[in-house]
Image: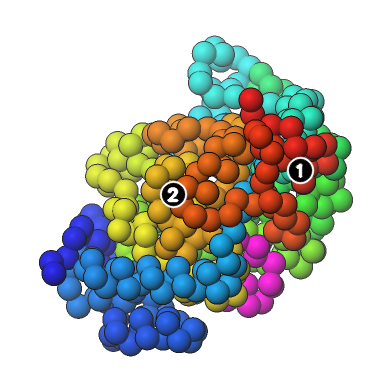
Amino acid sequence: MAAEQVGTNVPRGEFDFDRHSTSDQHFENALRKARDRDRLTVADAIELLTTGSEHNGIDPERKEAVLEAADRRRAEIVGEEVTVVANLNNNVTTACDTGCLFCNFKDSAEQFRADRPDDHPGFTKTPAESREIVAKALERGIYEVTSVSGLHPAFGLDDEHRAILEGSDEEGVNYRSPGTYSTDPGTYVEQIEAMSVGGVHVHSMTPEEAAHAKRGTDWDYQQVYRRLQEAGLDSVPGTAAEILVDEVRDVICPAKIDSSEWLAAMEAAADVGLDTTATIMYGHVENEAHRAIHLERVRDLQDRTGAITEFVPLSFVHPNTPLAENGMVESGATRAEDELMIAVSRLFLDNIEHIQSSWVKYGDEFGLKLLSCGADDFMGTILSEEITTRAGGEFGQFRSFGDYAELVRSVGRIPVERSTDYRQREPIRGEPPGPRLGPQADGTPLIE
């Protein structure tokens, strides 16, 4: 049978990468190892992601064999439950000058200055505003608030950090006094304290934000995360990972921390006792070799820490991003690539129990399909989603428990509410159903 959609086992675009999607392994050997639950290598992952690196394109029969192996592994490890979390996204600010080419969430921090017209589409929330938003959502039954924000130049870790930054003459620190801007975002500690209201679980401070929270100092990541933990931080989202191969990062996000810094920050968060997640953002300029190396680095991190509760593949949404506008990409990943990314994540990450299918990235119908490719988590209610939407996402910004129950049961699976760390679970029930695990949840529908 002919290969279906052309994959990326030939390099995307015109980028002269050192890593290519070829290996000295054979697809049949890699698939056998996956079925036997042997620990896979990077070469094995390349073969499974490409359905054989000796040819271009994805072979449909081989692809189905990989998906079947991953679905069987999912059933063995987590059974038939599909988990969701009642959560709120509270992104504090879009102000960011990092210049990542895959992102359309950011707005130039210059637009936020007090002496500029306030007619841009961005926003910055004060700690008081964040607290009010979270408190209202808590009354509706959320368990978790997730906060991932732009790197606002006025942000500091706390008052001590701001004082250091105010007195610094170091070049490239990316700091301006809060009075420069029309809205003071406060400090990271103030924002975490504000969102830590009424027992809600605060899931925030990516490695990139942690690096911003120690710039201009000789502090280590442990010090940063320990102070944030004291302020109320409960777990850390492993976003900003993109692809953990620096030759790719040099193209799509050259101003961000490198792969080793990301890993160091994640390890530090685990060292102070914080749970973490991990992600991959794929389908832009990288190839399957980069994806496989990324998986290996996440698995090695989990071997060292045991702190990663879930892995989240994020398919690149391209339409409104600089990568697309500059002609560096023409599309994101194909659906066949999405299926294989989920499946190989399940098969390769033998030390991470949960794999998420993001309905924001994939939509309802295809997101459900990915639950038969190795995924077992279907994201959360989120209530507000700006990052993917501003990049051109078309699949909505919130989800009710009623929607979840109907969708998950439609594919013969069991809808279950979970805590952020998966240690608490509650079957989704009621007519209409609502969350029960949040500090103020009582089964009342979160969304009417």
Answer above or below: position of 105 versus 228.
Answer: above
Which label belongs to residue 119?
none
Q: Is residue 127 left or right of residue 180?
A: right
Mark 1 is surrounded, within 10 Å at the Cα level, by few (under 14), some (14 to 19) or many (20 or more) other residues, namely many
Q: Residue at x 58, y 54 (%)?
A: 414
User: Mark 2 highlights which residue?
Assistant: 367
Amino acid type, residue under disc 1 in the picture: Arg
* Percent coordinates x, y for residue 20 in the rendering: 29, 71
Which label belongs to residue 436?
1
Mark 2 is surrounded, within 10 Å at the Cα level, by few (under 14), some (14 to 19) or many (20 or more) other residues, namely many
Q: Quadrant of the N terminus?
A: bottom left
Look at the numbered disc 2 and give the secondary structure of its residue.
helix
Mark in the foreground, 2 or 1: 1
Q: Residue at x 73, y 27 (%)?
A: 133
Q: Nearer the viewer, residue 357 or 117?
A: 357
- Looking at marks 2 and 1 on the same chain, the residue that comes earlier in the sequence is marked by 2
Q: Nearer the viewer, residue 295 or 269?
A: 295
| Residue 152 in view (yes/no) | no
| Residue 183 in view (yes/no) | yes
* Percent coordinates x, y for residue 355 in the rendering: 54, 61
Which span is picked out in magenta? Answer: 300-313
Q: Can you tell which quarter of the image residue 45 is in?
A: bottom left
Does the magenta-highlighted stretch encompass residue 301? Answer: yes
Separation of residues labelled 2 and 1 (CA atoms): 24 Å
